[in-house]
Image (tube, rainbow, N blue to C red):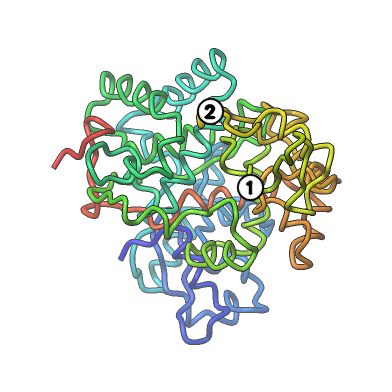
Amino acid sequence: MDLTPQQLSQYNGTDPSKPIYVAIKGVIYDVTTGKSFYGPGGAYAMFAGKDASRALAKMSKNEEDVTPNLDGLDEKQIGVLNDWVQKFQAKYPVVGRAGLSFNFYATSCPAAEFMVSNTVRSASSADPTIPGKLLRLLFHDCFVEGCDASVLLQGNGTERSDPANTSVGGFSVIDSAKRVLEIFCPGTVSCADIIALAARDAVAIAGGPEIAIPTGRRDGKVSSALNVRPNIVDTSFTMDEMLKLFNSKGLSLDDLVTLSGAHTIGVAHCNAFSDRFGQNSKGKLTLIDKSLDTSYAEELMKKCPAGVSSSTTVNNDPATSFAFDNQYYSNLLAHKGLFQSDSVLLEDGRTRKQVEAFANDQESFFRSWGESFLKLTTIEVKTDDEGEIRRSCSFATN
């Protein structure tokens, strides 16, 4: 049984009907018989439902160490970890493997992440809108069929052909990275991993936090336009509609607020928000959505007047358009959220405090972003024979 980090987290001891799992070096153990240690209230409860490799190696109970990432550990710590593996093997049954792992390509393609990062950096230096495009591409991939690069497949009736995806960009960057990887590591690195890594790197390049993410995703073989609309957020969604969709992907209310911060970069087409205001016969503003700041609405009206081209775009964040920061949340406090689905975060009592907290503390936002981004990139991933490694990201291999 292979479990993604997101699936593994469901076996954390909070549901008495489920066993308790702990993973070490990618191997999942059923530690239910040790629930006095790993169950709620236990001394090692923070390990439950996670890969605790680094924490065990360092003999640490810090939440930040409960990760499979072994970078920077010395020989003594690796020895300690191997001792833990022997203890677990002797005491607890193995029930499966964690489907993804850090440094998945360490042997098969050691420079894989560097090649992706270099491609993203080069593209972003030439076009500052690239980070926003790559981040949006990730969302549209992971929310439909999981993080499996199904959004990249071309052809009639595919996700990419749906009108909701015609404005999605960043495809050429993924293709460029894939071409380089196929030269040095043919048939090795999945397009799904490239999307996740590229979005991760895009955030860092734009000034956001650097995040370690696991790899090992396989590319999906199914891509249907019929699956797109029911699985992506519409800019007119209410809080309840967004929360229902996020919950269906294993994401929480906190994740919703945090991941909405992606709108601190990127652009939007006028038709995504133009229904929030209008013009009267004299060309004056008519504010339809009262939650929108009047002066901001007037700026938007000038950029998106009646009859404007459908290709016209506006920056999501009018203040720091190309910087990944917490300005998005400050904009919300000033009633300058571009979409209705942005503004509801301030209006709803369930999320207002988190918006205020992020607006006042960028580091808090960055910490939450790292956690939520990791969950986003592991939605319904495919591993082993569930998928394939495409030679071209635009077409299935088999």
Q: Is residue 184 left or right of residue 203?
A: left
Image mark for residue 275:
1
Mark 2, residues whose alpha carbon is within 10 Å: few (<14), some, or many (≥20)?
A: few
Mark 1, residues whose alpha carbon is within 10 Å: few (<14), some, or many (≥20)?
A: some
Residue 218 in the image: above or below residue 250: above
Q: Residue at x 60, y 32 (%)?
A: 267
Observer able to see residue 360: yes
Residue 280 in the image: above or below residue 96: above
Q: Nearer the viewer, residue 31 or 378?
A: 378
Observer able to see residue 149: no
Residue 16 in the image: above or below residue 204: below
- Counting from the top left corner in percent of width and height, residue 6 is at 48, 61
Residue 295 in the image: above or below residue 66: above
Q: Quadrant of residue 188?
A: top left
Task: Give the residue type that dot 1 points to.
Answer: Asp
Q: In the picture, which quadrant includes the C terminus?
A: top left
| Residue ranking furthest to the top | 126
Q: Earlier in the sequence, mark 1 or mark 2?
A: 1
Task: Give the residue type that dot 2 points to.
Answer: Ser
| Residue ranking furthest to the bottom | 17
Q: Which residue is mark 2?
A: 309
Q: Is residue 223 left or right of residue 286?
A: left
Image mark for residue 104:
none
The secondary structure type at the circle numbered 2 is loop
The secondary structure type at the circle numbered 1 is helix
- Counting from the top left corner in percent of width and height, residue 28 is at 40, 64
Q: Is residue 177 left or right of residue 51?
A: left
Spatial separation of the CA atoms under disc 1 and disc 2: 15 Å
* Mark 1–mark 2 CB contact (< 8 Å): no
